[in-house]
Image: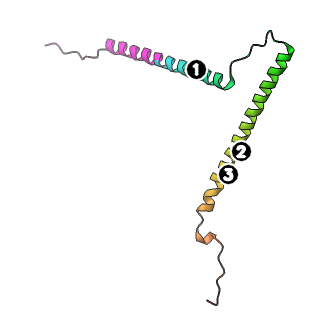
Amino acid sequence: KKAKKGFMTPDRKKKLRLLLRKKAAEELKKEQERKAAERRRIIEERCGKAKDTDDVSEEDLKELCQEYYARVYACEGQKWDLEREVRKRDYEVQYQPNMNNRTPQHLPLEKQNPKC
């Protein structure tokens, strides 16, 4: 009798590996495209469309610069507020547990009244 060959011959294994690699590469490419599209959408949502400045009068350019300045000023204010909030929370995390977990031996003793 002939020895029975297994289902997964070396040739089939090679083809299967190639198919799996191809499928994984396609999935990776789709995921990268999806992330890039999401990133572009978020940037456009936050920053708006780029304004055309080629054939614009000087007065319009000044107005555009003022708009951009106001936007940057507002963003910097928000950034400062967020940084302050982070510093405040870091401080609370660092020092607050020490205050809450104090044992009675760390607390100052109350003076007892000897007359009682």
The x, y position of residue 52, in whole percent, is 75, 13
User: Which residue position is annotated with label 3?
Assistant: 91
Quarter holding the C terminus? bottom right
The x, y position of residue 28, in whole percent, is 49, 19
User: Which residue is depicted at the point 44% across and 19% down?
Assistant: 24
Estimate how packed mark 2 is, as few (under 14), some (14 to 19) or many (20 or more) residues with alpha carbons within 10 Å. Answer: few
Mark carried by residue 61: none
Q: Earlier in the sequence, mark 3 or mark 2?
A: 2
Quarter holding the N terminus? top left
- Exactly how many numbered labels are in the figure? 3
User: Which residue position is annotated with label 2?
Assistant: 84
User: Which secondary structure type mostly characterizes the magenta part of the structure?
Assistant: helix
In the rendered structure, which segment of residues is drawn in magenta? 1-26
What residue type is disc 3 on? Tyr
Q: How far apart in space, not on screen, are marks 3 and 2 (Cα)? A: 11 Å
What residue type is disc 2 on? Arg
Which residue appears farthest toward the top when viewing the image?
A: 55
Q: Cβ–Cβ below 8 Å for labels 3 and 2? A: no
Q: Earlier in the sequence, mark 3 or mark 1?
A: 1
What residue type is disc 1 on? Ala
Q: Quadrant of residue 108?
A: bottom right
User: Which residue is depicted at the point 68% across and 45% down?
Assistant: 85
Q: How far apart in space, not on screen, are marks 2 and 1 (Cα)? A: 31 Å
Q: In this view, does 73 lie to the left or right of 113?
A: right
The answer to if 97 sits in the magenta stretch is no
Estimate how packed mark 3 is, as few (under 14), some (14 to 19) or many (20 or more) residues with alpha carbons within 10 Å. Answer: few
Which residue appears farthest toward the left when viewing the image?
A: 1
Q: In which quarter of the image is residue 17?
A: top left
User: Which residue position is annotated with label 1?
Assistant: 36
Q: In this view, does 22 lie to the left or right of 110?
A: left
- SS type, badge 3: helix
